[in-house]
Image (cartoon, grey):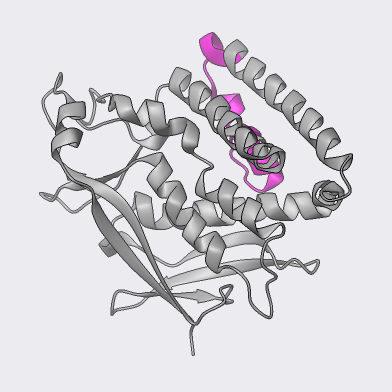
Amino acid sequence: MIIQTTVEGQPHFAIEQPDHARMCGQLACAFGNATFNPPAPRDLVVYVVAHHDEGWAPVDAICEQSPVTGLPYHLTQTPLPYLIQTSKGSPDFNEAYHPYCGLLSSMHTCGLFNGRYGLSDFIFIDKIPAEHKAMADALLADERNRQTRLKAHLADDSASCAWVQEEALFNNYKLLQFFDTLALYFHTTHAAAHQEARFLNVPDGKGGDHTITIVPRPGGDYTLTPWVFATDVLELFVEGRPITPQPVGTDFRAIFADTPKEKQGYCLVKSV
């Protein structure tokens, strides 16, 4: 779950991970223009992007409260045993839909523990406490085996063998990271605190990688340079709930059940 920052005295916006991923899917659907090729195979990439956090659904449903914040655990403070569960659950879900989706989802899991395959300098596996290290190592070994198995399966089919060529596969992995981190830019931080940010290693599908810069504008929308989408304006939304800190022991499942989801919208515009 993502607990968005807020201004003092205002509720936090709580976003379940599958809802975060649905907005990632909106980004994936819109990606592509004369400079940036759309992902290929498009339908499968869009699917896994929109469902890359599906393993979080049973964990988010618990709504376990942090004794520190009085809110449900935020994404980065989630207890590690839950992270292990979600990290296996998401590839399981996606593989059941299609082997290629399972492969990209598994790469996403391994990348989160290992610096996003060199795209990040934060190596989470090195920060894991000793008591959980064996569990994490076993997860990653299983996911590497999954990737080997799925790559071999896809390579044996003439319809999918090109998808698992190294450059093509890693381009789609990098696109997943871009959609994920761009959505997290909006979801983790409230609008008033947004600042200019850069997203590195965004592939154009033609052999090049680009740095994408997002800039908030006074009117409340955002420019993205270079522009990566098919239309000149892109309206996005995510669903979540406004919540406030509660005394330790509060049943947040009941609060969530009684609090309808609301939409939070964002507008990206092509700079003139």
Name the quarter where the N terminus is drawn: top left
Picture coordinates of residue 231, whole percent (x, y)? 52, 79
Q: Give the range drawn in magenta.
A: 109-133
Vertically, is 139 above or below 39? above
In the displayed orientation, state which residue is furthest to the bottom. Answer: 272
Tell me, yes or no, if residue 123 can be seen here.
no
Q: Is residue 246 left or right of residue 27?
A: left
Q: Residue at x 15, y 18 (%)?
A: 249
Q: Quick one: 270 or 115, which is closer to the camera?
A: 270
Vertically, is 187 above or below 128? below
Q: In this view, does 176 lie to the left or right of 156?
A: left
- Name the magenta segment's main secondary structure: helix
Vertically, is 230 above or below 120? below
Q: Is residue 136 left or right of residue 117?
A: left
Rendered image quadrant of residue 124: top right
Picture coordinates of residue 166, whole percent (x, y)? 84, 48
Picture coordinates of residue 85, whole percent (x, y)? 50, 22
Q: Residue at x 56, y 73 (%)?
A: 229
Rendered image quadrant of residue 215: bottom left
Q: Residue at x 52, y 51 (%)?
A: 180
Picture coordinates of residue 153, whole percent (x, y)? 82, 35
In the displayed orientation, state which residue is furthest to the top. Answer: 131
Tell me, yes or no, if residue 103 can be seen here.
yes
